[in-house]
Image (cartoon, rainbow, N blue to C red):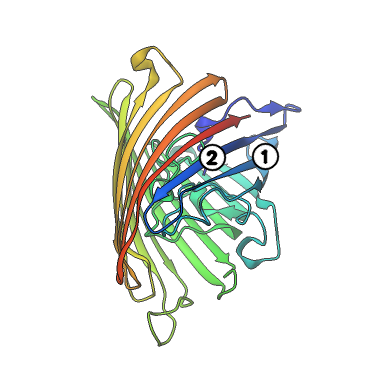
């Protein structure tokens, strides 16, 4: 997902209607075992159209277009080197025979006085807009690129399908719930329910946000081997914390049960972020992170992902990022792919 605070200048067509979004392009090269060395690129574009009839109501439509799939279809690993919505991701979304329309929802905000604010959204939504956010590890266009460091691969966070969301904010707390009916994309459709509790702290070392997410699905996922279908249940702890001026970090932990067939039983990841103001380059950022994904009940023993990036801000909304990933995966029948993926990404947020 694209973090709203990272967006560039929106185009205000009128006082009530605006257009913003992100355009990006990337080239990544794989130098890994069990695969040929190759380079691949991709260029996604995601414009958003926002209409605010008044202060309490909002309509938003987000479209997604892309050329190329980068290395996501080439790398013989379970994790994706770029978590963006690429060419195959924006066509026939969730097997719904719908392409390019990612989200389309209506939101109403109710002022509850001393009880805070309640936001209610309905339409075609993205669960990652509401659950498992993180200040330092949540934006594949300006932060880490690998899917293991954007949202928890051990979790099932559906995107771009019918649902409703409620977000209750009171003081430094918020409670968010998401309910969706998701297309199977060739498999069974399934129901999804996710809840997140969030607490924001203003500590002496800096602000931080601490989240716990739990989710459940309908009984529409196959068990390993033969047997009746099962549900999937999981939990995530997602924390971002500033440690000092211009230095922060994150921890994301995730676990899921193994009644259903799953690639990963658990995720343990952490990273650190340095703001370029430390070296008089305000707008730049440097990030380093590592993720260990413990295998589930299929053929993956575990996956290790390390990533480092430097984002160079050219102007407001325009940046270029040098990225380097290390991926190592072990499977039941031997060693999986292991090696390096260097890449470069250009992003324009408008």
Q: Residue at x 59, y 68 (%)?
A: 183
Q: Is residue 331 visible?
A: no
> Measuring 42% from the left and 15% from the top, which residue is drawn there?
281
Where 144 sits versus 99, above or below?
above
- Residue 95 relative to residue 254: left or right: right
The quadrant in which the C terminus is found is top right
Q: Is residue 9 left or right of residue 199?
A: right
Against 329, residue 21 (above or below) is above
Residue visible at 31% across and 48% down?
291
Asked if the residue under mark 2 is in contact with the one under mark 1, i.e. CB atoms within 8 Å, the reply is no
Label 2: which secondary element: strand
What is the x, y in percent for residue 258? 32, 72
**Which class describes the residues within 10 Å of circle 1: few (<14), some (14-19), or many (20+)?**
some
- Residue 272 at x, y percent in the picture: 30, 34
| Residue named by callout 2 | 27
**Mark 1 highlights which residue?**
47
Residue 327 position in % (x across, y down):
35, 50
The quadrant holding residue 156 is bottom left
Q: CA distance from mark 1 to mark 2?
A: 21 Å
All told, the count of numbered labels is 2
Q: Is residue 181 above or below residue 200?
A: below
Q: Nearer the viewer, residue 182 or 339?
A: 339
Q: Compare marks 1 and 2 and give the one earlier in the sequence.
A: 2
The residue located at (66%, 47%) in the rendering is 67
Can you see residue 308?
Answer: yes
Of residue 228 and residue 333, the one placed in the foreground of this image is 333
Q: Which residue appears farthest toward the right when viewing the image?
A: 14
Q: Secondary structure at mark 1?
A: strand
Residue 182 on image: x %, y %: 57, 66
* Residue that sits furthest to the front in the current view: 36
């Amino acid at each position: 997902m694209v973090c709203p605070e990272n967006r560039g200048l929106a185009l205000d067509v009128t006082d009530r209607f605006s257009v913003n979004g992100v355009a990006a392009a990337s080239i990544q090269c794989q130098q890994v075992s069990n695969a040929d060395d190759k380079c691949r690129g991709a260029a996604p574009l995601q414009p958003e159209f926002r209409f605010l009839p008044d202060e309490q109501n909002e309509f938003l439509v987000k479209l997604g277009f892309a050329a190329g799939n980068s290395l996501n279809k080439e790398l013989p690993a379970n994790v994706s080197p770029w978590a963006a919505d690429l060419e195959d991701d924006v066509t026939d979304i969730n097997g719904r025979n719908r392409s390019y329309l990612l989200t389309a929802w209506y939101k109403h905000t109710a002022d509850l006085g001393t009880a805070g604010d309640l936001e209610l959204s309905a339409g075609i939504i993205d669960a990652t807009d509401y659950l498992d956010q993180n200040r330092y590890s949540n934006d594949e266009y300006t932060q880490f690129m690998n899917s293991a460091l954007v949202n928890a691969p051990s979790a099932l966070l559906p995107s771009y399908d019918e649902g409703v969301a409620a977000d209750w904010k009171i003081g430094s707390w918020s409670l968010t719930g998401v309910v969706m009916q998701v297309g199977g994309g060739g498999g069974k459709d399934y129901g999804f329910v996710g809840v997140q509790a969030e607490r924001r702290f203003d500590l002496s070392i800096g602000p931080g946000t601490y989240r716990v997410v739990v989710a459940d699905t309908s009984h529409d996922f196959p068990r390993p081997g033969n047997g009746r279908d099962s549900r999937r249940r999981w939990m995530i702890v997602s924390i971002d914390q500033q440690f000092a001026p211009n230095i922060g970090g994150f921890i994301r932990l995730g676990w899921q049960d193994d009644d259903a067939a799953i690639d990963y039983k658990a995720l343990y990841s952490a990273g650190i972020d340095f703001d370029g103001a430390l070296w008089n380059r305000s707008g730049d950022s440097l990030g380093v992170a590592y993720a260990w994904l413990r295998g589930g009940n299929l053929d993956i023993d575990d996956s290790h992902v390390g990533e480092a990036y430097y984002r160079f801000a050219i102007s407001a909304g325009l940046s270029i990022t040098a990225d380097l990933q290390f991926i190592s995966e072990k499977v039941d029948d031997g060693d999986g792919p292991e090696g390096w993926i260097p890449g470069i990404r250009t992003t324009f947020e408008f």
